[in-house]
Image: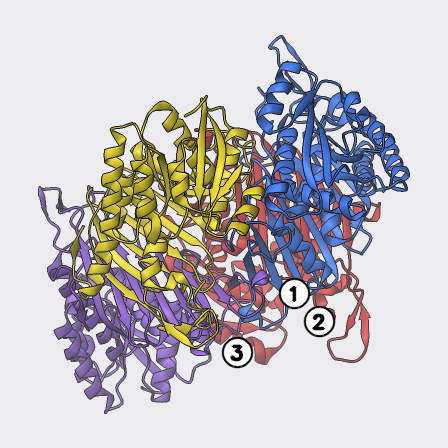
Chain colours: A yellow, B purple, C red, D blue
């Protein structure tokens, strides 16, 4: 850090790059942190495009080679928002160069890469270098409140976890064969793209880890038109994945991730049932949390709809008055806020690369179980 | 049938016996059917209690031995509302005596018994004797409407089925070791009690059969106090069962049945996603159906909440004006209505014993898969 | 009462006559009351139709003149389910003849008639004769629970009442000019038909009376086709009525009744806000109640959805296990139950004719205020 | 405008000042507009505080006298976010100086001031100077979609408008006597603060103007502790206001604004019923819209929950992918976007000062009707 500033370089300026740019920018505007963020450089391969994006998104400069970013003296943080197949190379190089790292989820496309990255982070940690993986939904206020209720013992012993992540983006068979549908680029399909979110979120909220799974995957549309309109090609990833699981605290769980749930744009639902209460969250109503407490007379009991919009809810510092909704970008801002605060304090931000590796191990177990005709696979 | 009457004898007068009594009684009051129901005799083992129940519920007589009911000339229908371990004996005797049979769900505690009953029904059918198994939720208007939408092709190709049946009756570890928690009486636990409903309902609504499963079961509380207060004993059934499945039309499915979902008294939820639309039902709001149609502009699309309270919704003949809710007892009344109409018309009522046997085969596959560490078991 | 029996005669067999018949019938089947109900005679003007209805609905006899019913020795109760313009004559004759009376709501078409009836009931009371007016929604379990919460002080001082009763039955201008749309038959329009329900319900639940109103009424479709298809005629009642009010406990209130709320079949909503909590009810989800308690941390507060399906909820005796929904007919059954119990105990059932007269006074004030350009009218 | 830039000065840096600052800042980041926004100066009376706020919120400079802002050559736009009692003076001075003006709602505390401001805007308009009043909820995507449905004739003839704005911020009698509760500062209470929003929103969405009202207001807590803790003082504004109204297209309407609706933080609900359909919006779920279409079979009809998160929904340009929620700040950003675009195009932005004056006239009529014992007052 130079002069009370944290100097950031960001690789990638598609959807996630824009979300991260916004978050870096808001951090100075909203929070009183011991260091100020400086948005030094945006990196992308196409010079014209990256120059325009840098100007618009508020970056001082642009570069076209991430290696340059990693090499520069005036960069403290490298933020990686590229597709998963390039994460390992960029991240390990950045860590080796002593840069703090933010890496979008999922950490990598394979367990091998993820483990390599976690090892690199462990080594860098001893030199005071921080690594962070961006499972953004952890910092939705409702998810934070969910975790707080569990951590405070309000649910008692957890018996059930039920998690689904439903989208319908690829339900139309005429949708073309984009990179997300190709194993070599995307690693896996709905399971990696959506399943990783619900695995991380449920482990985070319950404080329990998945110990084993039994899975089933399906590709409903096996060939799709090529994007350039010239013939078709094979879909090489899963359209949907369902699995049952056990958690190390004794809970049983079910998970489902799919791109074929017609009518659902981005519906992530989690419900947890414990001996003393239950809690449910639905991303379609991201400012709400349903909470049931078994205490009290049954005649007055019921799931209560908490509007998670109070200043003392988790991840609600620096926002509007009580009752005001937060949007999609909100948790990204709090990711950066917490990352900056952790770096300034010399602490490790979470989720760590180890947390992200654990998700990768579960994803891997899911794919192996699916290959074994749903046979149980330990994580 | 004597003299335009269908003369009924009912075995059992607990919860289900009361529900069936009410249904037999309402049938004459509400519908114009070619035959009238006559409630001849109620059967139970305790003479004092069964006499009081018969008087109250509107039965002309009472008897204390079901064999007497089966033997009487003036009985056309035997309705069996006893626990599952006695179904096979009573039902096969009644069919052999030429009585039409109504049997509460699940058909039996084992596949062997269920198969024997289905065989007996097949044989009796050739003599014009009818057999019916009471999966009551089929005749909720919302469930009927759900099936109609699927049958009319409004959902297109079905990709996903998601079914949960959540209760919390046994979540308290101090709840005693009742018969439902003992394998020799109840056959199985949540899977048989609750799972059977969602298996039947999803097969009915989709018109597809489960072809294979991968399952996991759990007993969270393994010993419970004996009902008489003298020590405790082992719970020998599942508290919860989760399984993934494939259906013969290409859909993938997930199922969960549990008694440990704190806050849920009787929450049966089913959602089905197809290529053209989706539909969702929640028993907590049994007069509603959520329906999404992919046709039309996305900006105006959404799950619409249909109040299934119009006279031309399924199973709504003979009820109140549009907009009036039906209660728990409603589908039982329509079961009897349809059973009586089928008998009068010389047709087979549904669900048939074969339908009920198919459910039993799935239940059996679920238990075997759970024993095989979630390995895939074909139905 | 002869011989432990309460012998009932019912006038009218349209919608409400059927609902009351069902309730009389269920009472013996469901409850243990000190007297048994005997359904002696159904009365209607068309002999063929009333005979068929009597047979179907379970009445022993039929008669074609209500005067006969009132005159008979073997009738203890006269239940009046005719249109409002005939209530006063039948009811006062029945009371004069020493019959207990059940009268459907609203009590009468005018304040003058209602007052005459209340006076007759007061006189009869001294002779041990009971009179009851059927505001059925009072005995929905959720409404009972609402009242209980208010009565127990759980809402504190009540500040706001918000009540709407929305239907869309007459929204289509092609709907014919039925009797409900004619002042001489129906007395008034939406205000009498729907408004009376929400006036009674809010007064009942809050324990406060309306002391003054400011109202606005509208007839959107002023001429409609005659039912016989020959030309059209004028609508002489209100299609919609809106009014603000003050209650004698200090609350302010808003009311709306309309037949032109497209998409609403039978949507009665009431919300009450007090200093300590709030409660909301929606007839479309009649087994639910929303309850907010201000006590406790704001971060955990929210409207909780109580399923009012527990055995110890109000008006839930004699029903199914916890979690089972009740239907439209349920409160009618409990009306009869409570009426029979009151008669047997020598007590006055509620709502009394005085309660019903108070509703009539509010309705009258509403119509007068509307005539006075919304000027304030005291009740 | 200097050099393709629109140079802005903002007066006020409390809640609304922060919201506007954020909006000015985001405009360059998110949209491609013909002019760029330059955040020149923030104005506030306390130099230390305004300097800190300017630095944090991204303003180049700070000033302590709004007159300086108005006088500067290098300012093109004056944005007024002060309490209502200072609006008229600042705004008219700015317009006279040829500055474009953004003014927070409500336009003024009195009709006289509002009229003076509207006149000033009309005069300035001829010189190409633009004036805009910030009724922010107009630019919620769901509200925009609501208006679009009405404008496209999807609701047919509008019969009913139902609007409530419920908060509970002052329900606690111990809450101190802040400026909002004093007539000389705030002009009025809940009616001006909250009622103005629902008046503007319903007029905007329906395209109809309120022509007359009948109103009732109440102050539940008449004395409150002074903020400095030394004794108490009188509350001189309304805590709640209820009114019925007629709109110039034939609809009848009810409105309620209150600070005493326990459990409601910021619940603005509007429902509109027309001859062909209905639409409902609830700010607690600001990314949703309920829409009912009367066309199609009644058995399939229902209010559908549209997630207003598609790129081609109104006011959704420049946001995240389909399915991503927007937060409280979103409509402010689109206000600025549309204001800048209008200024660049030489067009008048909306809502205009005339639109805002019309709201003021309704507010005034409401207060007069309340003084007249709810007598009808024409607007």
Tag 3's secondary structure? helix
Where residue B356 appears, as percent x and y from the top left, is 25, 74
Q: Which mark is residue C52?
A: 3
Measure how far apart labels 2 and 1 are at the Cα level. 8 Å
Judged from the image, the secondary structure of the residue bearing numbered disc 2 is loop
Q: Which mark is residue C169?
A: 1
Graded by Cα atoms within 10 Å as few (under 14), some (14 to 19) or many (20 or more), the crowding at tag 3 reads few
Q: Residues within 10 Å of mark 1 (few under 14, many from 20)?
A: some
Q: Secondary structure at mark 1?
A: loop
C173 relative to D206, above or below: below
Chain under disc 1: C
Q: Are marks 3 and 1 on the same chain?
A: yes
Front position in the image: A296 or C102: A296
Asked if the residue under mark 1 is in contact with the one under mark 2, i.e. CB atoms within 8 Å, the reply is: yes
Residue C348 disc label: none
**Residue under numbered circle 2:** C175
Q: Nearer the viewer, residue D251 or A22?
A: A22
Asked if badges 2 and 1 are on one and the same chain, I answer yes
| Image coords of residue A220 (percent x, y) | 35, 71
Query: Going by the image, does A95 lie left or right of C333?
Result: left
């Amino acid at each position: 850090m130079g002069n009370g500033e944290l100097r950031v370089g960001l690789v990638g300026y598609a959807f996630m790059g824009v979300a991260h740019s916004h978050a870096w920018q808001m951090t100075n505007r909203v929070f009183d942190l011991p260091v100020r963020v400086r948005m030094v450089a945006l990196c992308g391969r196409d010079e014209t495009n990256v120059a325009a994006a840098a100007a618009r998104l508020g970056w001082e400069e642009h570069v076209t080679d991430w290696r340059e970013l990693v090499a520069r003296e005036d960069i403290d943080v490298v933020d990686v928002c590229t597709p998963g197949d390039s994460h390992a190379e960029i991240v390990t190089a950045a860590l080796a160069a002593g840069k703090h790292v933010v890496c979008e989820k999922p950490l990598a496309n394979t367990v091998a890469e993820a483990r390599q990255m976690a090892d690199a982070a462990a080594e860098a940690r001893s030199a005071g270098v921080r690594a962070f993986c961006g499972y953004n939904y952890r910092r939705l206020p409702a998810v934070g409140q969910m975790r707080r209720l569990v951590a405070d013992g309000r649910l008692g012993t957890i018996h059930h976890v039920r998690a689904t992540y439903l989208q319908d983006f690829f339900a139309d068979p005429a949708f073309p064969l984009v990179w997300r549908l190709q194993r070599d680029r995307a690693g896996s399909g709905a399971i990696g793209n959506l399943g990783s979110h619900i695995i991380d979120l449920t482990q985070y909220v319950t404080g329990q880890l998945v110990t084993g799974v039994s899975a089933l995957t399906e590709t409903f549309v096996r060939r799709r038109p090529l994007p350039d309109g010239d013939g078709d090609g094979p879909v090489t990833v899963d359209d949907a994945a369902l699995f049952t699981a056990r958690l190390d605290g004794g809970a049983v769980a079910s998970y489902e991730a799919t791109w074929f749930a017609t009518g659902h744009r981005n519906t992530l639902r989690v419900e947890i049932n414990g001996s003393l209460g239950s809690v449910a969250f639905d991303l379609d109503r991201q400012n709400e949390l349903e909470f049931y407490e078994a205490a009290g007379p049954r005649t007055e009991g019921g799931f209560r709809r908490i509007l998670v919009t109070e200043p003392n809810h988790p991840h609600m510092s620096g926002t509007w008055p009580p009752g005001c909704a937060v949007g999609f970008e909100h948790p990204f801002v709090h990711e950066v806020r917490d990352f900056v605060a952790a770096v300034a304090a010399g602490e490790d931000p979470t989720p760590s690369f180890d947390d992200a590796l654990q998700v990768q191990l579960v994803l891997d177990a899911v794919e192996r179980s699916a290959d074994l005709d749903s046979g149980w696979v330990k994580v």
